[in-house]
Image: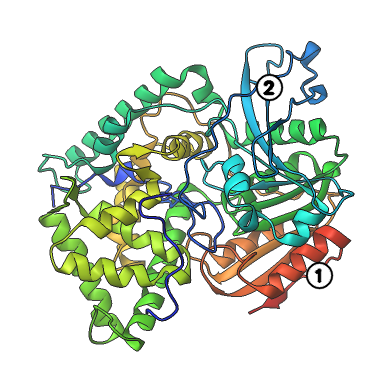
Amino acid sequence: MSAPELAPWPDDQESSRRRSPWKRWVLVIGVVLVIVGLVVSLTGVWQLFQPTVQRPTEVELELPAQPVGGAFGEQVPKWTDCGDGFECADVRAPLDWDEPEGETIRLRMVKHPATGGDSLGTLFVNPGGPGASGADFVRNALDSAAGAPLQRSFDVVGWDPRGVGASSPVTCLSAKEMDEYLFGVSDSTAERGSAKWIEEAEASSREFGEACLKNTGELLGHVDTISTVRDLDMLREIQGDAQLNYLGYSYGTHIGARYAEMYPEKVGRLVLDGVLDPTASEADVVREQTRGFELALRSYVEACLAGKECPLTGTVDEAMAQIGDMLDDVDKQPLVASDGRTLTASTMLTAIITPLYSESNWGYLNSLFANVADGNADIAFSLADSYYGRLDGEYLDNSTEAFQAINCLDYPNSVDPERMREEAAELERIAPTIGKFQSFGDVSCAGWPVKGVQERMAVRAEGADPILVIGTTGDPATPYRWAEALAEQLESGVLVRFEGEGHTAYGQSGCVNDIVESYFVDGAVPESGATCS
């Protein structure tokens, strides 16, 4: 998602003037990868990465006729060849599922037909985000989305959820305006966390939300996850599958879990990898992600100091302190990149977080820290641009806008300054290096122009067939404890533990691959608690 593209690192390499943190949720929840994942912070929450930096698939498609009597599942998609063996189609969905005969929206699908002849049905795939394009994930990174055994046995389908990509999109700002929103430097002298600082943050968030409402319209109030779950059940019916086969990564696990809760009898084979705990509040997500990325950064430091050409020195604690000093320095005195943008602590933190999604990309941190130590901001902006999907001054998709719009509906909150200050103190305690730059995220949705709709409730999916829940012990974005929590909540949850680093496990471990592919293809259910390393 950026320039330059993040490929796996070669094996032989080992102040008041700041961008406001409310402009950078951590997108929890996002894609797999072997290459690089996709994410921002859920008001401290980080989004996940798509595996490659490629422009979205652009093709004009004809919609089916307007469904009669709300029979959206009876639509016949007009599949169109979109190159390299892929087929694309658009279908209609109700803008508001409570008014199925009202206005409709467009949903984009991309299908790769089974390569082995007779298909076992459809395997739906979602990469996460929220805000990531499932259509582009399948079209541009099929091997990352689903391994060869799954490609042989299933028609693999990715779709852009409502509000995302080539589906009816959330639209907020121009590229220039987005640059100012993400990277602009405030002239305010208000102290972080003060009443004036919070007031200014709320005003900025409100201005962004108003732009989204103006440019998106009524759709902005209908991009919540439950509406997407209902869309997914419609797509299942359109595809002619009696039950849903589904592989969800990161935030995609939340879609899958909520589907199982709403339609337990329609659950076929579900794999949820890089799991969100459905009961976690926004504050819980921020706290656990902050803890996770601090630990991942520490693991990188240990590996860096043990290798060659590490730009950090001393003990692990001393090296972590050096990183903290770099963040403090650019917070007080931002650096200017060659393109004129100003590197603040928030953007620097985004640059640090981006390679931490995959251990194979840790080597980029060596270059980042050496570059910033020399007073150069260019590598930091290359990494941040990768995170935000920015290339040559343009944004390749609307993932940042969709991320905030979806989360503001899924995680409704109110601003309580004293509570936020208490949470800020806890973040700095559990994550001494990055914690203080993750705080006060509640203001991201405080002035949102449409009301949040989803409560954070446990899922049981009573009566559903076995559901595989995969957690990685060193996952910084979706901690292993969340996988344990979801497996415990689900009546038929089967926990698979991957002992490793990085976000998500399928595609990273031969052992996990075998379990997932045997489950989908043969229906083989492992013992709960199965462990891979």
Q: Is residue 56 visible?
A: yes
Amino acid identity at mark 1: Pro
Mark before the other along the chain sequence, 2 or 1 = 2
Q: How many marks?
A: 2
Q: Secondary structure at mark 1?
A: loop
Image-based side of 380 in relation to 244, left or right:
left
Q: Mark 1 highlights which residue?
A: 526
Question: Pointer 2: what residue?
Answer: 92
Q: Nearer the viewer, residue 107 or 28?
A: 107
Image point (77%, 22%), residue name: 72
Q: Is residue 473 above or below residue 139?
A: below
154 in relation to 353, above or below? above
Using residue 359 as the reference point, say whether residue 71 is left or right of it: right
Q: Secondary structure at mark 2?
A: strand
When asked about the image quadrant of residue 504, the answer is bottom right
Q: Give the quarter of the image for residue 211.
A: top left
Q: Amino acid at mark 2?
A: Arg
Quick one: label 1, few (<14), some, or many (20+) residues within 10 Å? some
